[in-house]
Image (cartoon, rainbow, N blue to C red):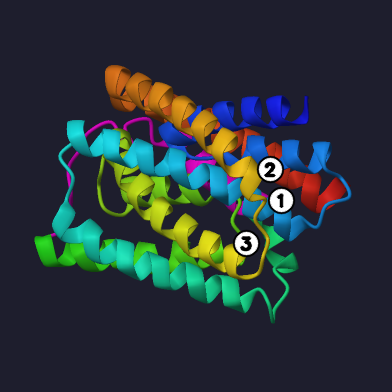
Amino acid sequence: MEIFLVSLASLFAGFVDSIVGGGGLILTPTLFAIFPTTHPATLFGVNKSASIWGTAAAAAQYAQRVQMPWHALLPAVAVCFAGAMAGAWTVTVISPEFLRKALPLILLLVLGYTLMRKDLGRHHTPRFTARGEMLAACTLGLLIGFYDGFFGPGTGSFFVFLFVRWLGYDFLHASASAKLLNTASNLAALILFSLKGHIWWHYVLPLAAANVIGSLLGTRLALKHGSGFVRVAFIVVVSALILKTSYDAWLR
């Protein structure tokens, strides 16, 4: 029964994450609820061991249907991987507790800005030259990759928002680009958790398979309905993240 429940959560997490990020909002709490006495690092490792496959599958699907700015994204992937590794190392010496209380407020600002700018992310109008786009993408990869390794919640949504707001992408191109970078940050975290022995390998296959199935379904839905649909999904997921992170920071 345990493997069935966490696999179902992994499927739903892959579905949501492939559209706009936020899959950890579903799978991680499920793991903590079902295995309450397990070390948190192990549960985070299980989450990463499942989510990386769905994120990679979504990135591959998007790459086949969306014109990707590879000149900017490939260097950003490498920088993002390094940033996530640095963040994961930093969390071993500095507590991320201060971010726990600040995160709901940051997400609220992101949501408010998105709601006020009704045209935000509806049109794909990159605002940088090729070199500028690469530098901007690498900056995002470094900062958000570091954040993912150091703390993590909302990483996919932050990637999407900043690709839209700063680089001028529409929500569909932003989500596609975010998946590629998020795969790199997930890989860095997975390597670190593996080296520390925090992976339940007997859970990897069923959770990864479920996550990939959910991811493929979500990606097809996003590609079919376009940026308007992804924008609505973004608003819903960020709203849910605000509620969840507020509860974790102030009420628990």
Q: Residue furthest bottom?
A: 93
Say above or below: 27 vs 142: above
Callout 2 secondary element: helix
Residue marked by disc 2: 28
Residue marked by disc 3: 151
User: Does 133 sit left or right of 160 as displayed?
Assistant: left
Q: Amino acid at mark 1?
A: Leu
Residue 47 coordinates in the image, percent (x, y): 62, 46
The CA span between labels 3 and 2 is: 13 Å
**Sequence-earlier tag: 3 or 2:** 2
Quadrant hosting residue 247: top right
Q: Is residue 118 magenta?
A: yes
Residue 235 is at least partly visible in this image: no
Q: Which residues are magenta?
A: 104-128
Q: Residue at x 61, y 51 (%)?
A: 153
Say above or below: 83 vs 13: below
Q: Residue at x 80, y 57 (%)?
A: 39
Q: Amino acid at mark 2?
A: Thr
